[in-house]
Image (spheres, grey):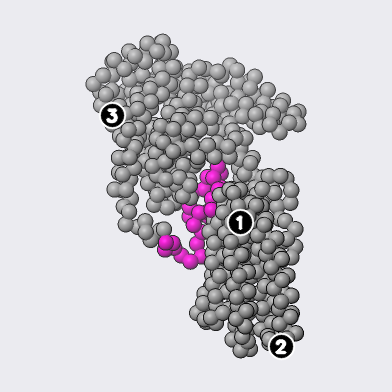
């Protein structure tokens, strides 16, 4: 087997993989956010989730992308394990669409797809047309690669050593191992089955052993999700195991059926496919997957329960209360799952965590201002270091993902998220300022009147409410408190002016010392600015969707 055969095969495989990636990434960029929202919300029942997973995978042409996204959702807490089971099973059927397309031998149309896609990309000014053109171009590259691989494989028939090895492959267990290993290396069952389909079309391999290699492909396809789960939470690990357990059990069931009824199954496949070996392979792939899902869908609860046996519940409590290194990212970064389709979702979860830390620290600082508790003051400074760490880490992450092939709707949000990081960090700074003033009170022995303490408490309650509503509106994209936030912002502005005027009156009546008065005035101003930053956070993404400035005018006060 010479270079004249190996190089065209390698080049064809490269084109096929590249075309598949371009097509999948382009579809994900064009509709990824919408598909992700559907996947996230429409998975309440097992059957519903299964169909959503099927459709999602069929559209983006990658069960790996779908299952990694599901694992990422579970990791972020957006989906429960029982919700994840349905889409995982559906993804197993959706992945067979690629082999079905390949089996129809559309290679002759590849130049048409390439030319049409290139012309639209070069000359069209319509953004949607350009997105569709990228998908069409990827489709053309994919089939161009298939055509080149097919031509190279036709020459393999003349190489006796190769045909002898392939035709001697008769052991069913060995066939499963070969399929699993190849798919684990390529990380795509669609690619492995497509190559198998081309080989069968060239009579390089027997149809009987192909059935077993397909079963092995199903197990090897679990590798991307397993790798993603390793970096995630315990539930993320369990979500990846759902995929593996389903495919192992499904493979065992079909394996024994094939052992005892292989002639009947091949006869059935010939009946629905004709004498076209490629169609037989594609239909076998689809039939096996549908059969496995029908058999195992009623047992999804038991499959999920099995994952708890492999990854015990004993460590869940520690994970939930956050037994982690103090300055460690929880939802993003090098030690957790990264998926372009959920990168922005994960960033928002990390921002939500950072915002809650800043809010809690502000209340800790206000409490220390009154109690003058040295330990609480020290805790404020320690938490502020953590908030600064999150500020730099999340900013760096946003810079990185801004250069990745993200869904279009997600890209529009990146600018807003940069501003949200800044606003949360400023709330953290205000907490630190309050701690500084608590120390100043201790040094100067300054005391507040009961009226002043009551006024600060009232304003803090209002600020806590607007911060809570704003974080919820931002992190959950929920508009139910939008009017409350706008009303509260106005009330806080008025309240701040009223309190400042009342404070001046107390100073004039000598009811307050100048030292305490300066601290009081700074606290009231700082709380009003916290409310402004909270309002910025609430409306950041809404403003970016309207293509306005993500940061509202209030931030100028900061």
Q: Which residue is mark 1?
A: 470
Is residue 301 left or right of 370 when viewed as pictured? left
Q: Which mark is residue 253?
A: 3
* Image quarter hosting the N terminus: top left
In what element is the residue under mark 1? helix
Q: Position of residue 431 (x, y in %)?
A: 60, 71
* Image quarter hosting the C terminus: bottom right
Residue 491 lies, with reference to residue 272, above or below; the image says below
Q: Pick whichever of labels 2 and 3 is earlier in the sequence.
A: 3
Q: Which mark is residue 510?
A: 2
The answer to whether residue 164 is seen in the rendering is no
Q: Pick whichever of labels 2 and 1 is earlier in the sequence.
A: 1
Q: Position of residue 86 (x, y in %)?
A: 41, 36
- Marks 2 and 1 sit apart, C-alpha to C-alpha, by 39 Å
**Residue at screen point 30% across, 44% down:** 306
Single out the mark in the foreground, 2 or 1: 2
The answer to whether residue 508 is seen in the rendering is yes
Q: Position of residue 286 (x, y in %)?
A: 41, 24
Q: Pick whichever of labels 3 and 1 is earlier in the sequence.
A: 3
Query: Quarter of the image holding residue 183?
Result: top left
Q: Is residue 337 magenta?
A: yes
Magenta-colored span: 321-349
Of 471 and 397, the residue lying toward us: 471
Q: Which mark is residue 14?
A: none
């Amino acid at each position: 087997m010479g270079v004249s055969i190996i190089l065209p095969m390698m080049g064809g495989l490269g084109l096929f993989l590249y075309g598949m990636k371009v097509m999948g990434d382009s579809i994900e960029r064009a509709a990824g956010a919408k598909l992700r929202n559907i996947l996230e919300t429409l998975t309440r029942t097992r059957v519903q989730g299964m169909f959503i997973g099927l459709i999602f995978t069929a559209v983006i042409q990658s069960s790996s992308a779908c299952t990694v996204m599901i694992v990422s959702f579970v990791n972020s807490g957006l989906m429960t394990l029982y919700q994840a089971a349905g889409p995982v099973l559906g993804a197993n059927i959706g992945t067979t669409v690629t082999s079905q397309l390949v089996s129809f031998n559309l290679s002759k149309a590849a130049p048409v797809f390439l030319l049409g896609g290139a012309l639209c990309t070069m000359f069209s000014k319509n953004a949607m047309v350009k997105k569709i053109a990228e998908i069409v171009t990827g489709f053309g590259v994919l089939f161009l690669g298939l055509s080149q691989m097919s031509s190279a494989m036709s020459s393999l028939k003349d190489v006796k050593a190769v045909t002898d090895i392939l035709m001697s492959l008769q052991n069913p267990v060995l066939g499963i191992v070969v399929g699993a290993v190849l798919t684990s290396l390529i990380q795509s069952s669609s690619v492995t089955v497509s190559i198998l389909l081309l080989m069968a079309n060239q009579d390089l391999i027997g149809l009987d052993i192909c059935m077993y290699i397909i079963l092995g492909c199903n197990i090897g396809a679990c590798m991307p999700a397993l790798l993603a789960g390793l970096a995630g939470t315990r539930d993320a690990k369990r979500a990846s195991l759902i995929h593996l357990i389903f495919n192992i059990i499904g493979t065992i069931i079909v394996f024994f059926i094939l052992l005892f009824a292989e002639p009947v199954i091949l006869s059935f496949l010939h009946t629905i496919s004709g004498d076209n070996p490629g169609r037989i392979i594609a239909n076998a792939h689809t039939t096996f997957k549908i059969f496995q899902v029908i058999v195992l869908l009623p047992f999804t609860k038991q499959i999920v329960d099995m994952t708890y046996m492999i990854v015990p519940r004993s460590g869940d409590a520690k994970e939930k209360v956050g037994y982690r290194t103090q300055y460690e990212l929880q939802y993003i970064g090098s030690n957790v799952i990264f998926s372009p389709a959920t990168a922005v979702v994960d960033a928002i979860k990390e921002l939500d965590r950072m915002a809650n830390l800043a809010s809690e620290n502000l209340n800790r600082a206000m409490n220390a201002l009154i109690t003058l508790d040295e330990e609480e003051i020290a805790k404020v400074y320690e938490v502020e270091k953590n908030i600064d760490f999150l500020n730099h880490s999340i900013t760096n992450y946003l810079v990185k993902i801004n250069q990745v092939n993200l869904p279009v709707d997600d890209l529009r949000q990146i600018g807003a998220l940069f501003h949200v990081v800044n606003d949360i960090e400023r709330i953290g700074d205000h907490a630190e300022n309050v701690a500084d003033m608590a120390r100043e009170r201790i040094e100067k022995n300054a005391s507040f009147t009961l009226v002043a303490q009551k006024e600060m408490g009232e304003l803090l309650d209002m600020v806590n409410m607007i911060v809570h509503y704003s974080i919820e509106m931002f992190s959950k994209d929920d508009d139910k408190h939008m009017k409350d936030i706008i009303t509260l912002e106005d009330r806080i502005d008025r309240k701040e002016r009223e309190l400042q005027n009342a404070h001046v009156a107390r100073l004039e009546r000598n009811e307050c010392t100048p030292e305490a008065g300066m601290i009081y005035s700074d606290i009231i101003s700082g709380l009003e600015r916290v409310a402004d930053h909270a309002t910025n956070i609430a409306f950041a993404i809404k403003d970016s969707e309207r293509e306005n400035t993500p940061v509202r005018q209030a931030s100028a006060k900061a």
